[in-house]
Image (cartoon, rainbow, N blue to C red):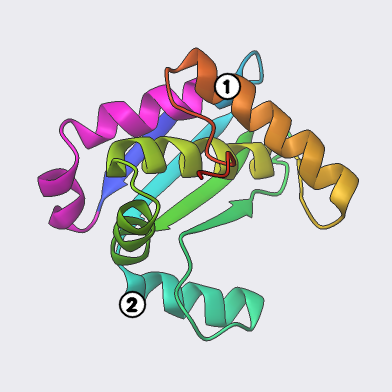
Amino acid sequence: MIEVEVEVEAWSAAVADVEAVVTRAARAALGSATGTVTILLTDDDTVRDLNARFRGKDSPTNVLSFPAAPMPGADVQPLGDIVLAHETCAAEAEAQSKTLANHLTHLTVHGVLHLLGRDHEVDAEAEAMEAEEREILADLGVADPYRVLP
């Protein structure tokens, strides 16, 4: 199950049917994995606060992933939560000449992969995670986000 909470109206104003965009991306990233994911579409202030409290970084970022602890006895296990900051994501999309919908799709896929245990702390992990993202995004019709433009 995927639950999308739009806390900041700017997301809905900027991306047509934003909940469907996020849900489609999350489902694609989940593949055959089961579990619940909650995705919060919020603003830089909220993400800055979460980033400071949980990562010790007092700044906004585009996406945060919070894996859930297993819940013994639950029929469907929670995978965790993903939080996205509108202002940061919108600025990145503009700077990278992407639509916000495509950038949001990428960051949602990225966040879900983190909930599934993927990481990018070392080069080999980063390459594997980026390859998986490229494949999922290609299936969704989104261009390679890591391609270097001339």
For label 2, the residue is 45
Q: Which residues are magenta?
A: 7-28
Label 2 packing within 10 angstroms: few (<14), some (14-19), many (20+): some
Of callouts 1 and 2, the N-terminal one:
2
Of discs 1 and 2, which sits in the foreground?
1
Residue 82 visible to an observer of this rendering: yes
When asked about the image quadrant of residue 136, the answer is: top right
Callout 2 amino acid: Asp
Q: x and y percent of residue 142 in the render?
A: 43, 25
For label 1, the residue is 136
What is the residue that sits farthest to the front in this orientation?
Answer: 150
Q: Secondary structure at mark 2?
A: helix
Who's the residue at 29% across and 65% down the image? 87
Q: Is residue 142 above or below residue 3?
A: above
Q: CA distance from mark 1 to mark 2?
A: 30 Å
Q: Secondary structure at mark 1?
A: helix
Q: x and y percent of residue 108 in the render?
A: 48, 40
When asked about the image quadrant of residue 92, the answer is: bottom left
